[in-house]
Image (tube, coloured by chain):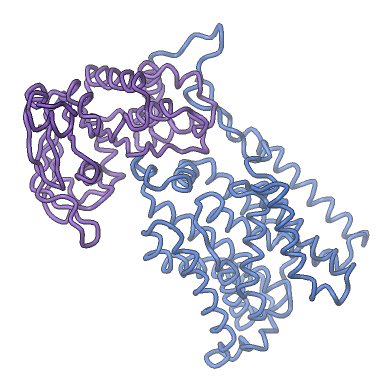
Chain colours: A purple, B blue
Amino acid sequence: MILQVKDLNVAYGSILALHGVAFEVAEGEIVTLIGANGAGKSTSLRAISGLVRARSGQVMYHDADITRTPAHRIVQMGIGHVPEGRKIFANLTVAENLEMGAYARADRGSLQAAFDRVFKSFPRLKERLKQNAGTLSGGEQQMLAMGRALMSTPKLLLLDEPSMGLSPILVQEIFSIIQEINRQGTTVLLVEQNAYMALQVASRAYVLETGRIVLSGPAAELRENPRVRAAYLGQAV
Amino acid sequence: MKRTNLTAGLPLVLLLALVFFVAREVLGSLEIINYYWQLILDQSLIITTAAIGLSIIYGFAGQFSLGHAAFFGLGAYTAGLISKLWGHGNYGVFLLSLVAGAALAGAVAFLIGLPILRLRSDYLGIATMGFGIIVKVLMDNSNKWITATGGATGMTGVPQIAKFPVIFSVFLLAVLLARNLRLSSFGRAWTAVREDEVAADAMGVDPTRVKTLAFVLGCALAGVAGALYAHRYPIVHPSSFDFLKSFDFLIIVVLGGLGSMSGTIVTGVGWVFLLEVLRAVLGQSFLDFRGVIYALTLVLVVILRPKGLLSGMEWQALIPRRVPEGNPPAKGETPNVSA
């Protein structure tokens, strides 16, 4: 297991956002967490990458406990996080954004290789290198956010709502890129409201409701689950 | 892979500094720059040195500080006291007092920053403002503990041995230090933290660490500038380091354009000279109009150049624009695949 989350409790002030959440991700997988607004999907990712501290529970990465590891160390350990709302550096150019993504890299030599890999996945970024990131379209900003996270060559990529605010055609494109990145050897943990797309690309899925995992299983199975179909796929059973 | 030569502009910068220095010496010895204007020139360099400190804190790293004059004052009092009590005009003690002024200001900044810089957002502004007020009160009453400081009447008797060469050298060192940091990975981390702290954290930047470094260094520069000030102006008075003076530094950095070091230097020097020219033109009524002029200048700049005079601009010799690493190879050039 590349990632194991055990009995994770996270609170914002006195409000508990995660109640004993547990899930795991195997090397090479695409795993998705689906659920409605406020279910705790983003909080789960933020707890893994160290952006919020867990109140109790454990996050194990390659059998190392990273529950209390600071965020910047976690990046160096090989977990890349594409935060919700992209959080690109709007006043910096595309190239500078990508360079920032490589900040945690210890090896300067392979920088160009990292750039090449990102350009292969996102050729459009290459055309816009000198443009300010804030002037990119929504889809391009999402690509930049993902490309930036890939610059650290993560072993595990955490994606928070990559489809947010994108047109259906762009969502298709982003998801096929996610599959491509996965095929090249990056394990992906995907958080999505667009359960339909997420269950298409993922091998396994967990359903979160108000901070608890209520369902889990192979994505293909969950696609057929009446409860999932009614609640998240908008299909009458 | 072709990369920008980060030191390419340096000879030009140093040459210009040398030309400026020699020209000042010549003009000074010919009495074309008289005592009065030399005083103003020295003041502008001292103020700009401190302003570069704030430029690091606020312009580079995006941390809002409202107590810069307090750190300037800490440096002035520390160095002034050392020189007054033990120096008696000794140049070695003077240089040591400069280091002490910078060190004390930096150490205090570290202690203040320790709890606050862990937090996101603008708590630093409130804390430094409070700190500035406390420091002013302490200075006013300092003669109760150390009589030599003079308390609210101000401290006199500090040997006036800071001449143009040493003031200019410290200024130049401050510029070069800020420049090198700006171009280092710290500079990049500062930009990232300024733009979006959460994203910077997610990129592997330790925000607390880089913010603390910016704050401590910036305040240490204010401290060394204050130390020079004490050795150049006969009266070190608490009112020279109050909240309004902190605002002066803020105006310089914001007017120059946040994040632009060239802007800070130009406005820093320009601001001091502007105030002096106005003092000459308006005479005694200048003091009454000071507030009006501040406000008017700010309003005008905000309307004409909302992001500051030189925002987004840098003198290329001083701070070269970095050629992005991922630049697509030019036509005819073989792409560097392996790297």
Q: Looking at this rendering, what residue extends furthest in the front direction?
A: A236
Q: Which quadrant would residue A166 be assigned to in this image?
A: top left
Q: Looking at this rendering, what residue extends furthest in the top direction?
A: B332
| Foreground pick, B321 / A185 | A185
Location of residue B277 in the rendering, given as x and y in whole percent from the top left corner: 85, 63
Q: Quadrant of the C terminus of chain A?
A: top left
| Foreground pick, B39 / B118 | B118
Q: Which quadrant would residue A32 be assigned to in this image?
A: top left
Q: Quadrant of the N terminus of chain A?
A: top left
- Residue at the spot x=50%, y=34% of the render? A134
- Residue at the spot x=21%, y=41% of the render? A41
Residue B134 appears left or right of A164: right
- Residue at the spot x=69%, y=38% of the render? B11
Q: How many marks?
A: 0
| Foreground pick, B80 / A68 | A68
Q: Is residue A190 above or below residue B337?
A: below
Q: Is residue A158 above or below residue B244?
A: above
Residue A42 appears left or right of B74: left
Q: Which quadrant would residue A167 be assigned to in this image?
A: top left
